[in-house]
Image (cartoon, rainbow, N blue to C red):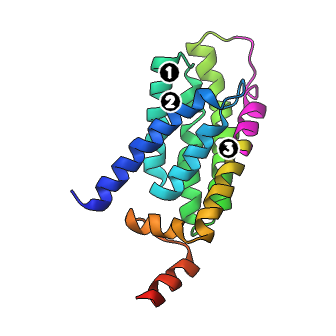
Amino acid sequence: MKRSNLLKLVLLAIFVAIGVVISPILRVEGMCPMAHLVNIVCSVFLGPWYSLLCAIMIAIIRMAFMGIPPIAITGAVFGAFLSGVLYRVSNGRLICAVLGEVFGTGVIGAIASYPVMTLFWGRTDLTWFFYVPSFIGGTLIGGSIAFIFLLALRKNGLLAKFQRELGAKVYDKPAKRAAESAK
């Protein structure tokens, strides 16, 4: 197994562990901002598919051991995947990763949660947009923290270094030039 693949799997496991552990600790009723932080950071480090896998694993563990309803899955997968896709399509703009999480979870995931909660959980007192305000609020909080964290990593060159170690595409041009001039 290549070193970068092993690092990706280890980092994925770390993201899943962090997501499971901090989600009940740093939680506001109806919001889980730290899950969005993990989704965005995982998207930037590993890409959309790993981020999607991470969100699914965190949701399944939380549902199995913490009694969280199925919106743990619908509220996570769309934002996690869209965050990684928009980050790549925008050539590494961090704000696009955050916007992907906000739109994917805050709008798509929130609306997709209505039929899941109605059909499988028996909640008949909901509307299609019931979850939108709390999901958007949670994504804005977690997204802001992720943006500040990733911006700090980018500023000191660690983001590009981590991405290179993971075998991911490095979008940070100033860091690329500094690394090439150091050779």
Judge the density around disc 1: few (<14), some (14-19), many (≥20) Cα neighbours within 10 Å. Answer: some
Instruction: Tell me, yes or no, whether the highlighted magenta stretch contains residue 52.
Output: no
Q: Are marks 1 and 2 in contact (CB under 8 Å)?
A: yes
Residue at point 53%, 57% (across, down): 44
Q: Are marks 3 and 2 in contact (CB under 8 Å)?
A: no
Left or right: 103, with 9 as reference point: right
Residue 98 lies, with reference to residue 142, above or below; the image says below
Q: Earlier in the sequence, mark 3 or mark 1?
A: 1
Report the residue at 55% width, 22% height from top: 70
Q: Of the residues shown, which amino acid type is indicated by label 1?
A: Met
Q: Provide the residue span drawn in magenta.
A: 124-140
The spot of residue 37 in percent (x, y) is 61, 45
Q: Badge 3 is on which residue?
A: 142
Residue at image coords 61%, 59%: 150
Find residue 63 and name its label. 1
Q: What's the residue type where badge 3 is placed? A: Gly
- How packed mark 3 is, by other alpha carbons closer than 10 Å (few <14, some 14-19, many 20 or more), is many
Q: Earlier in the sequence, mark 3 or mark 2?
A: 2
Q: Residue at label 2?
A: 59
Name the foreground residue: 98 vs 82.
Answer: 98
- What is the number of the mark on residue 22? none
Q: Which residue sits at x=67%, y=56%? A: 147
* Residue 89 position within the rendered picture, expressed as x and y whole percent measured from the top left: 56, 64
